[in-house]
Amino acid sequence: MTLLRRLRRRFRALAFRRDVERELADELQLHIELEQEKNERLGMSPDEARRSALVTFGGVERYKEEARDVRGVRFVEVIAQDLRYALRTMRKTPAFTAVVILTLGLGVGATSAIFSIVNAVLLRPLPYDNEASLVRVYSAPPGDRMPKFSVSVPDYLDFKARNRVFADMAMWLNSTMTLSGGGEPERLSAIVSSDNLFSVMGVRPLYGRLFLPGESEHPDGVVLSYGVFARRFGSDSTLIGRRITLNGTAKTVIGVLPPSFRLYTRDIDVVAPVAVSQIPKYNQRPNHLLRVIGRLRPGVTVAEAQRDIRRVAADLATEYARDNEGWKANVFTVRNEIVGDLTRPLMILLTASGLVLLIACINVANLQLTRSAGRGRELAVRRALGAGRGRLVAQMLSESLAYALLGGALGVALGVLGTRALVALAPAGINRLDEVSLDTRVFGFAMVVALFTGLLFGLWPALRSSDPHIGGALRDGGRGSAGTIHAWRVRGALVIAELSLALTILVGAGLVLQSFRKIVDLDLGIGVDNAVALRLTLSGRYQDSTIAPFYARLQRELLAVPGITGVSASDRAPTQANATSTDIRLLERPEANVAGTLMSQVSVVVPDYFRTMGMKLLAGRDIAWQEPQNVAVVNEAAATKFWPGSSALGKHVVFGRRSTDSGVVIVGVVSNVRRGDITSPEEPMVYLPVANAASFGRTMMLVVRGSLGTTATVNAAKRVLAGLDPTLPVYDVRTVQEIVDDVVAQPRLNATLLGAFAALALLLAAVGIYGVIAHSVTQRRQEIGVRVALGAQPADVFRLVVRQGAVLAAAGLAIGLVASWLLTPVLRSWLYEIEPSDPLTYAGVAIVLGAIALAATAIPARRATKVDPVLAMRAE
Amino acid sequence: MPVESNDVLQGTLDMLILKALSLQAMHGWGVAQRIQQISSNVLQVNQGSLYPALHRLEDRGWIEAEWGTSENNRKAKFYRLTKDGERQLSTEAASWRRFATAIEAVMSTT
C-alpha cells in the first residue's frame, strides 16, 4: 500500500511537474498571506506586515528546494533540468557547439569505422566450432624460406598416424569443376577433400548431410556451397538427392553448406570427397599436393602441436632421407592463417584513428576549458545564489555529456558511412571484409568512447570552475587571478600535445603517401592500355595434344576481327606471382647446381605473348607455334642470375632436381615484369610455350588488345570463343588496368586512410590552436588596450599575439618530430624506397603544420590589432 | 546555515506537527500557529522549514493532504493525521517521554 502510494506520488511529481510546482507555490503563498494578515491584525502597516511575514518564513526558494527533495525524484528532475539548460546553452553558442560536436563526431566516427573493420576481420569469431583448436599443418622445405609448403600424401598419412596431439586430421586439394546442363556452363571453384574434413572443422550442413566416414572410397555425392545453391539452383531444397553434371560426370547433391562456411581465403562452390589412392602420384613423397587441417586434442597448445609434428617430420627426414632430408613441419592456428597479414596494418590504422580521437578529445577539453574560464562570473553568481558545488559539477558534467552524446551520435553516423566507404575502398581478397557491418559491439565501443570522452573533458573544467573563491571571480570575472594563469598553462600544454600528435600522424601519412606515389609511378614492364583479360578453362574433353591447336585457332580467328591488334594467353594474370618456384639445373654450369639453390618461376604462354603484353624482347626471338625442339624464353632477371657475364641464348635449363632429360633451350630474353606486390623486382622466370606444357594450359588468362574499346573487345572475344566451343566457361573478365589497380589497392587504401586521418588531425590541431589564441586575445583585451593607448602600433600588437602562438607551435613541433622519429619505424613494411626517418618529409610536414598553426594564430592576432583602447578599457 | 537557538530541535519538529494535527486537520500556517500557541510562544517554529517537513510526513504516509477552502474562501492544502500517523505519534511521544525523563534525571542529580 505504502509503496504503491509513494510510487504514485513520485510518478505524479515527474509527470505533472508543473502542477506539483504550482501547488507548492500556492501553498507557500497562502502561508505568507495569512501571516501577513495576522501581522496586520497586530497593528503593523501592510508593508511592514509583509516584510515581517517573509522574514519569519525564511528563504522561500530554499524551502521549496527542500520540499522538492522530499519527492524523491530529485535526481531525475535535476538531470532533465541540466540537460534542458545544456541544450539552451548550446543554442546560444552555435559556433562553439558545432565545433565541439564536429570534433567529437569526426574523432568517434573515424575510430568506430576503423574499429568495425578490425572487429569484422580480427576480433569476430570464425564460423568454426572451437576455432582455437583448429590448426593448419604444413611441410617446410629445407632452408626455412617457405614455412607453409603443401604436404605430400605419404607425409600426411604418417603425420596422421604418428602424432600424439591431434584428435583428427583432414586434407584437401584445390580444384575447379565445370558445371553444365541447364544454362550457361559455369566454372566452379572446388575442393576435393578427405571425407572427415567437415567433421574436423565442425561444420554442420544447412540442408541434407555432409560426408560419411568411408564415403571417399565410392565418391558419388558432392556438397554445394550456399552461394551456388542460391545462385544456380534458386535455393530449391529439393535439390538434395538430385543429380547434377560436373566435369561431364553426373554427381548426386547430398548436402548444402551454411552461408557462413568459408575455407580461408577461398570461396568454395563445391566439395567432393576423394580417397588418397585416387590422388595422382599419391605414393611419392616429393609430390607436395595436400592442404592439411587438424583438430587438436583438448588441452593441447599450438606450441605443443608444433613440437610433436616436428618430431614426426624429423623421424621422416631420417627414414626417407632421399626425399625428406632437411624437411620440417609447421603448425599455425586457422585464425593466424586468415587474419595474419592484416593484424599489423589494422593495428597501425587503429593507432592512427586512436590518435585522431585523442586529438579530438584534447581539442574538446581545451574548448570546454576555455569557455568555462569565460563563464567564471556566471558560475560565481550561481554559487552565490545558493547552487551547491556538487550541483554545479553535475551541471557542467551534464553539459559535457550532452556534447558527448550528440558528438557520439554524429560519430556513429559518420562511422556507418565511413565503414561503407572503407569496404568500398578496400582491395579484394581481404578476408571476411564482406562481413563488415556496424554491429552492436562496434556501436557500443563508439558510445563508450564518446561517453568517456565526455566525462574526461567535462569533469576537470567542472571541478576547476567550481573553485570556491566566489568573491574573487565575482570581482574580476575570473581574469588575471592565479587560477587563470594556471588554466592558461594547461591549455598551452594541451595545444602542444595536440600539435605534436598531429605532426606524428602527418609524418606517418606523408611517408606512406610518398611510398604510394612511388609505387604507382613504377614501370610495371607491361603495357596496360586497351587490353582486356579473361579467364577460360578447357574441360576434360580436350586432350593435351589438342590444347595448343585450340589456342592457335583462337588467336587466328580473334586477330581476324578488325580492330584487334594482339591476342595471346598465359597461365597467370599479368602481374600475378606464383607462390612456388621450381628447382632447376643449368646444363652449361654444372658447378652452380647445388641442390635447392637454383629456383625459378615458370609460366606457360601462347606465342606473341610478349608483344601483346607490351614487354620488350631484349635478345633472341619470341616462341613460335612450330618449334624444332623444346624451347623457352627467360626474363632478364634469370639471364643475369643464371648466366652472369654471358648470353643466355642457346643455354639449357633442366627442371627438377633429378630429371635426366636435356631440358629446354633458351631462344630469347625479355624484360622483367613487376609481379606480386610489385614493389620488389621480378624473380627469375622461364616462359614455356603452351605446345610443350599443354597440361598447364587448361586454365589460361586470355589477353586481347585492340582499339575497339573494352566492351566491344570482350564481346568479340566471347563471340569467337562461343564459336569455337559453346560449353567453354569464360569468367573473370577485367581490363589489364583493373588488374594492375588491384595490385596497388592495398597501398592505395593505406595511403588514403592515413591521408584522411592526417587531414583530420591537421584540421583539429588548427582549430585547437585557434581556439586558445582567440580566447587569450579576448582575455587580454584590456591589456592590449592599455598597450595601444601607450603607443603600441598594430604591428606590435600583432607580433605580441602571434609570438604567443609561435611558442606553442614550436614546442609542439619539436616534441612531435621526436615522437615521429620514435614511432614511424612501425610503418616500415608500408614504406617503399623511403626511410622512416626521411628528413625531407619531416621538414615538409613541420613547415606545413607550423604554417597552418601560425595562420590559425593570425586570425585572432588581426582581431587584436583592431582593439579600440577606449572601448577595451571602459568595458569593465 | 547557522542553527538559531530558538529553532525547534531537529527531529522533534515532525512530532510536534503530528501532535498539532492530531487535534484537527489544518493547513501549514495553522500548524505553525498551533505549535507556537500550545508552547506559549516558547517554541519558535522556523515557518519555512515546516513545509519540507509536511511534505516528508506526507510522503511517509503519516499525514495526508487535501485541497479545501480556508478563511476568506482561499484555496488551502489541509493536512490530516492518518492511522499510521497516529501510531507514529504515540511511538514518538513515548520515546520522547523516556528521553525527557532521562534528561531530567541527569540534570536533577547534583
Image (tube, rainbow, N blue to C red):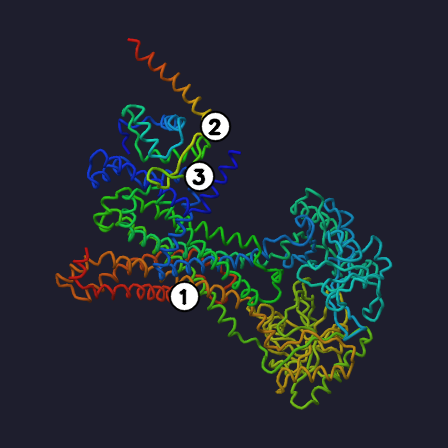
Query: How far, Cα to Cα, is label 3 from label 1?
Result: 62 Å
Residue A428, relative to residue A812: is it above or below? below
* Relative depth, front residue between A63 and A627: A63
| Residue labelled with disc 1 | A841
**Nearer the camera: disc 1 or disc 2:** 2
| Residue labelled with disc 2 | B84
Chain letter of the residue beneath label 3 in the structure image? A
Q: Amino acid at mark 1?
A: Thr
* Relative depth, front residue between A716 and B8: B8
Residue found at x 61% / y 85%: A709
| Residue labelled with disc 3 | A72
Residue found at x 63% / y 52%: A125
Task: Tell me the crowding category of disc 3: few under 14, some 14 to 19, or many 20 or more residues within 10 angstroms, Cα based.
Answer: some
Coordinates of residue A200 in the picture (x, y in percent): 74, 51
**Nearer the camera: disc 3 or disc 2:** 2
Q: Is residue A618 at all visible to an observer of this figure?
A: no
Kind of element beneath mark 3: loop
